[in-house]
Image (cartoon, rainbow, N blue to C red):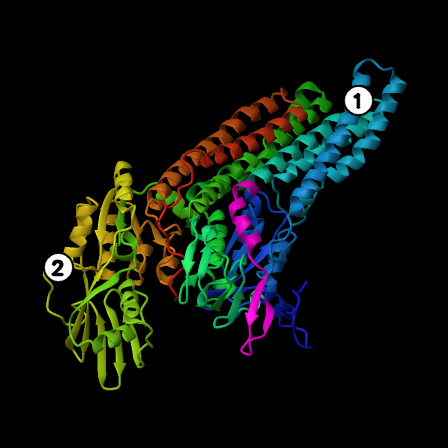
Amino acid sequence: MTAPGLALENGASGAAGPSASDELLAYSVPAGEGTRAIEFVVPDVHCAACISTIETALDRLPQVKSARVNLSKRRVRVAFSPEIGSPLELEAAIRASGYRTHPLDPSANTARNTALGELVRAMAVAGFAAANIMLFSVSVWSGADAPTRDLFHWVSALIALPAIAYAGRPFFRSAFAALRVGRTNMDVPITIGITLATCLSLYETAISGAHAYFDASTMLLFFLLVGRTLDHLMRERARGALGNLERLAPRGATRIHADGTLAFIAIDKIVPGMKLLVRPGDRLPVDCMVAEGTGEVDASLVTGESLPVAVSSGTRIAAGTINGASSLEVEVARRAADSFLARMITMMSEAEGARTRYRRIADRVAAIYAPVLHTTAALTFLGWGLFTGDWHGALVNAVAVLIITCPCALALAVPMVQVVAAARLFRNGIMMRDGAGLERAARVDAVIFDKTGTLTEGAPRLERQNFGTPDLLGVAAAIAAHSTHPLAQALARSAGSVRPIRGDVREHAGAGVEVRDGAVLWRLGNAKFCDAPDEPADVAGSRVYLSRNGEVVAGFSFEDKLRADASEAADQLRRRGLDLEILSGDTPGVVARVAAHLSIASWRARQRPEDKLDRIAARTAAGDRVMMVGDGINDAPALRAASVSMAPSEAADIGRNAADFVFTSGKLASVPFLIDIARRAERLVVENLSLAVIYNAIALPLAIAGLVTPLIAALAMSGSSLLVVANAMRLNLGAPARRPAPGVRPALAETAA
């Protein structure tokens, strides 16, 4: 419903209808380098075999660059090139694999979770049927005569058959879809087991047999559904923080037109440069800059900081932030799909589906498990039948084998730990871009830090102009406005409102900015870049120089404070046995003072991007597993080259995109916290895989030996899955979530690209 007084602006389409391919392409978003990304909802995916089947089918298509299934969200994200092949082939490939699917609208809120409702209803029907059939079974077991026994068996059949047909749909649908395309999954043995038990009961009832197993069939189905429902709930709880983010994303905003009129605009129609009115209590749908107004905002959803943050004209605010008591007029900086909040959600989603070493092992085992399981069940049936002549008992034992050794626990062993770890990190202000990075972080033995913007607050201030005429400050500020480097931004702020200088602009990573304005070549950057005299090794503060046609005409000194918890974070990392080092492009004197303050013995100054890259390569060649923590454009190559990398959320876009993890809290305590979680997660993965293997090593011989009934098999199989999930949830135990210390404000939003 549109708010009173507002026109609805949603960009209605014209008369001509789009083609099916164009319509599907509209659901995709740009993914860089000429590719687009699209998400499909796949409600039937629930195991490692499902993941492998879908990803393999998509990877065969020439237009597909990558395909990743997110098990907890039941979605598949595909990066593809629309120029090579039609997106219709993506949907067709998923359907050909035996799965229902439809594209996810990126502008819509997360759809209501229908899977949980279906499971709960099915569980209720199975439980009701099992309870009533059990009453008749008690009478039969108590010694009812043959006619009464047959009557109770037929009544039980009338209750059981519709109940099994309805409650078994989650398993039957998945199994039939897999068999239809010539493959198996973990629901195939479950379906076979339930079907065989039901058919055997009908046969016994038809021939007036003494035993029927309708109670076992319905009770078996009930326990299987209990296990799957609890598993579903635990997964949703594990990723509940991310789900809250998705659900809280606004549908749109109030646009301010040039003539001052207001109109509601859908979130997918908001573009950079638009003016929006943000009323008190509104949540920002996109990254913005305050154009008019002052007030306070709640950025806790994005940064983890509970204290309100003051904003005024020029302040950048990230999507997801809630406005306080004053109305603000803001200018849009990025589209919703490119906003800070959208990228954080994408990072989490991709991290949950990452292909780690342990997950690849589990997937390979689960892929060959189904044929081995079916063969074992068949041999159990033949063996018992041939050696005992009791084909009825042989069938019961084969059903027990099919059910008890279903590889649910194995399929959940790794992804559940990843989901819980991603959620725990998120609640502590750490976004995981690559789940495989969590595995690498567990084995780190050295941490290398950049200085400016990483160990320091990244908000230096101009201390003084060392030499040069006062008017050159304005020239330097105009050039600095072209750069996102912290020193350049501080210089631009110091001169107030300036317009970037016109001309041919080039930024040299780790050096400075070059602007050619007609016959004049300006350079703003470090001493080497501007051909300035070498600085003394003990010079205080960071220096920036301005040169005109090769002649140094001005110099500026800056001061940048260390992050409040830098010393504590360094001490925590040392206590964890990690070797620390600083690589900085700043002067030796500045870097030496920072290193001494943090008790870091190894440091290097005046490091260019290639120098940092060479240093990481040298340490890697020496056998070190290095984590790089940096924030600037000049850190991007090193962030990519390191075994695992981390960047603050206020880092330059290229630095954030190169890092495996992004911390939004502004606290360096995020680094040791990440390593702690990574090490605990690796231990839990090993424990889960061990539990799955031990369970199957014990359960399979017992089932083959005829010591397990189908009902006990269902309990054991569901119990093993829940044990693995519960063990993964232990990652939520331990130290409470870290929050920034009072009075320390994290970066509210990113630096504009």
Taking the image as shown, residue 10 lies to the left or right of residue 591, namely: right
What is the quadrant of residue 40 in the picture? bottom right
Q: Which residue is mark 2?
A: 539
Q: Per the image, is 250 magenta?
A: yes
Q: First in sequence: mark 1 or mark 2?
A: 1
Query: For the point 62% across and 68% down, which residue is it?
Result: 21
Q: CA distance from mark 1 to mark 2?
A: 89 Å
Query: For the point 62% across and 43% down, which residue is it?
Result: 184
Give the extent of the magenta segment: 236-265
* Disc number placed over residue 135 in the picture, else none: 1
Q: How many numbered marks does the figure carry?
A: 2
Amino acid type at mark 1: Leu
Helix, strand or loop under label 1 = helix
Front residue of 651/543: it is 543
Label 2 CA crowd tier, 10 Å (few <14, some 14–19, many 20+): few
Can residue 22 be seen from the camera position used here?
A: yes
Q: Farthest right residue?
A: 147
